[in-house]
Image: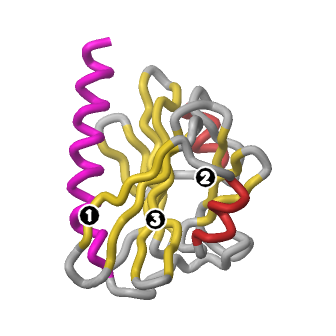
């Protein structure tokens, strides 16, 4: 249990650092996938709603309904700010620039939401590699897959998925 807490804290710290690095990306950066997720890239399915990285946030937020909470995280000084929408099954981060808001990051919290290939928390590591192939990067219990300007990371413990995060990477 203690090891799991340490890993979760380490992952949180890494994600916070990544947030700071990517949050001030250029306005208009989008993932290479089309908004319906049919071309390239990763997405999450939650309660019948497809959530695609880089897609305009308005329609997705409307389809998801009211979040349990929402907070503006920070403003980069260039007119960009990050918003965090907390839902029971996942946390959804968006990047706001002026009136535009796009899906920027997703972190799953339970097995009620799944990836584009049906992987959820509790899935086996072998299911991840069967669905996505060899990881682009591995790091101390995590498998990271890259598609264009998107990354999806699976945290693995004892052969099981214990964390899933999707991130839109901007330059």
Q: Which residue is mark 1?
A: 74
Q: Which mark is residue 132?
A: 2
**48 or 34, which is in the foreground?**
48
Q: Image quadrant of residue 111? A: top right
Q: Quadrant of the C terminus?
A: bottom left
Q: Residues within 10 Å of mark 1 (few under 14, many from 20)?
A: few
Residue at the (71%, 58%) spot, across then down: 50
Q: Dot 3 lies on which element?
A: strand
In space, the residues marked 3 and 2 are separated at their CA atoms by: 25 Å
Residue at the (66%, 63%) spot, across then down: 60
- Locate residue 53, reporting x and y percent: 55, 66
Q: Quadrant of the N terminus?
A: top left
Residue at the (22%, 67%) spot, across then down: 21
In space, the residues marked 1 and 2 are separated at their CA atoms by: 34 Å
Q: Dot 2 lies on which element?
A: helix
Taking the magenta stretch, the answer to whether it contains residue 39 is no
Q: Is residue 99 left or right of residue 3?
A: right
Q: Residues within 10 Å of mark 2 (few under 14, many from 20)?
A: few
Return the residue found at the far right. 48
- Locate residue 46, reporting x and y percent: 70, 46
- Asked if marks 3 and 1 touch (Cβ < 8 Å), the reply is no
Q: Which residue is mark 3?
A: 94
Q: Is residue 3 left or right of residue 28?
A: left
Return the residue found at the far top. 1
Main SS of residues in magenta: helix
Taking the magenta stretch, the answer to whether it contains residue 6 is yes
Is any atom of residue 135 visible in this view?
A: no
Residue at the (59%, 75%) spot, across then down: 56
Q: Which mark is residue 115?
A: none
* 115 shown above or below 121: below
- Locate residue 102, reporting x and y percent: 51, 73
């Amino acid at each position: 249990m203690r090891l799991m807490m340490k890993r979760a804290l380490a992952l949180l710290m890494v994600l916070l650092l990544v947030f700071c690095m990517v949050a001030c990306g250029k306005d208009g950066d989008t993932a290479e996938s089309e908004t319906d997720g049919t071309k390239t890239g990763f997405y999450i399915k939650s309660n019948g709603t497809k959530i695609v990285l880089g897609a305009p946030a308005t329609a997705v937020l409307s389809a998801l309904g009211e979040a349990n909470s929402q907070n503006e995280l920070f403003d980069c000084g260039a007119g960009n700010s990050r918003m965090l929408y907390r839902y029971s099954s996942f946390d959804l981060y968006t990047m706001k620039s002026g009136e535009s808001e796009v899906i920027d990051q997703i972190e799953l919290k339970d097995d009620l939401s799944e990836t584009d290939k049906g992987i959820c928390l509790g899935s086996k590591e072998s299911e991840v590699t069967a669905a996505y192939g060899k990881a682009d990067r591995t790091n101390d219990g995590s498998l990271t897959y890259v598609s264009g300007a998107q990354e999806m990371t699976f945290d693995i413990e004892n052969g099981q998925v214990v964390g899933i995060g999707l991130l839109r990477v901007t330059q």
